Amino acid sequence: MVGRWLRLMGTALAFGVVLGSPPAIAHQLPLSTVMNAIVKVEPTQVHLVIRVPLEVLASEYTSFIVTFPVIAGSKIDLAAAGPATEQTLQGLAREIAIWADGARLVPSSATGRLSLPSDRSFEQYDQAVAHVARPMSPGETLYSNQGSFDAHITYPIASPEARFAIQMTVAPKLPEEYLKLVVRYLPLDGASRAFVISNQSGRVSLNPAWYQAAGGFVRLGIGHILSGLDHLLFLFCLIIPFRRLRGLLPVVTAFTVAHSITLIASAYDLVPVGAWFPPLVETLIAVSIVYMAFENIAGANLDRRWLITGMFGLVHGFGFSYALKQDLQFAGSHILTALLSFNVGIELGQIAVLLVVLPVLWLFFRHVQADRIWMIILSALVAHTGWHWMLDRGAVLWQVQWPALDAATLAILVRWVAGILLAIAAVRFVARRAGGLSRRARAASEGAAASDLQAPGVR
């Protein structure tokens, strides 16, 4: 009975794809609607200047729905727009929160106005503030499905050196790809930064301390590896033939070193650019899964597995970088800290996977007969999934336009070939060191056991 249940558990390890789709979105809120905001810090105040498209205020997904009075069908009645303006200011002050050292700031003043679609005042902070202070002329015409609502909200602060954060909850039930808030942060001293956040971003630090950035990116790395099914299947293929962590150490070390190299290179924009590169990476990740699965089926030389694992680790590092790049904006001035922390999170996630899967595989193969057959079956199931991914992603890759093979492209290619060779050399050195430590530990353990057998009184 135990063996039967373990066989079922082993088979189930190859599955877990959960398909889902976002809910239908009301037609009045198109895909990728963007709000713009500027947060400026002054010695005694923080200013929030924000522009919200009118279609957001009228959407059924908005936490506060505002309807401006109209005349002649859809033309906004500017003379009667005062109550709706106050309602919008109250809603924005409630759903766009500013925090200082963990305490939510309370607005001391708020002004707002309607704006034409042609207005460009939000390109500069001073222009935006001056624009909000001027009401619309009664002679201007604005329709309810056009234009935007602009607001200027002021918050008193105790110190401009506080740790500031912002959080948006304008449409909490809306999928994050439908509504973004672009925030430009202007500190009292230091370089300005830009952020793109959504309802699902939570509280975002505008000037995080190094430990805040480190903690956030460790969590991000853990979440990415545990939610990335392709990376998990690759790890599963790696560990299927192994029964002990000791033999797996050089392989995991090679994978770690390799993906760390390309992850850091990607973060500093030292990677090929163009629409062809991301589909190529995704296709090669699928290829890595299929290759590892077929290698398990054919019977791999486990002593050399670290080498091919390191080569595929370079590819997976590019894949990790795509998840990191969109969140690297939240690192503030601690880019290197964020990179290292994200990598630490990935390693913690991998260790968690190993600590769960290795004992399960050990128990599974201990209670089944013909464990070689079951290793082939599990690998074949993974290969089946990876094969379909490879075909689907390869079809996308086939459609992209490849770069022209000119002198500049050849120079980039030569530089990357040299970099990959250096990365492989680094992986080889570290993996051999890890393998040597593992062998010395095993030899020491065996030597201690032999000494015990040769001790007086031992037969």
Image: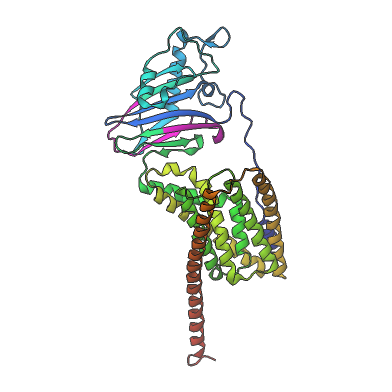
Q: Residue furthest front?
A: 407
Q: Report the quarter where the C terminus lies.
A: bottom right
Residue at image position (51%, 86%) is 450
Q: Nearer the viewer, residue 200 or 408?
A: 408
The answer to whether residue 366 is above or below residue 88 is: below
Q: Is residue 443 magenta?
A: no
Whole-percent x, y for residue 455 in the image: 48, 90
Q: Quadrant of residue 121?
A: top left
Q: Report the quarter where the N terminus lies.
A: bottom right
The span picked out in magenta is 154-183
Badge count? 0
Residue 299 visible in image: yes
Q: Is residue 441 left or right of residue 402?
A: left
Image color mode: rainbow
Residue at image position (46%, 51%) is 342
Q: Nearer the viewer, residue 458 or 132?
A: 132
Q: Nearer the viewer, residue 391 or 51?
A: 391
Whole-percent x, y for residue 186 in the image: 35, 33
Residue 223 visible in image: no
Q: Quadrant of residue 377?
A: bottom right
The answer to whether residue 293 is above or below residue 221 is: below
Q: Is residue 165 magenta?
A: yes
Whole-percent x, y for residue 207 in the image: 36, 40
Q: Is residue 21 left or right of residue 32?
A: right
Q: Nearer the viewer, residue 196 or 14?
A: 196
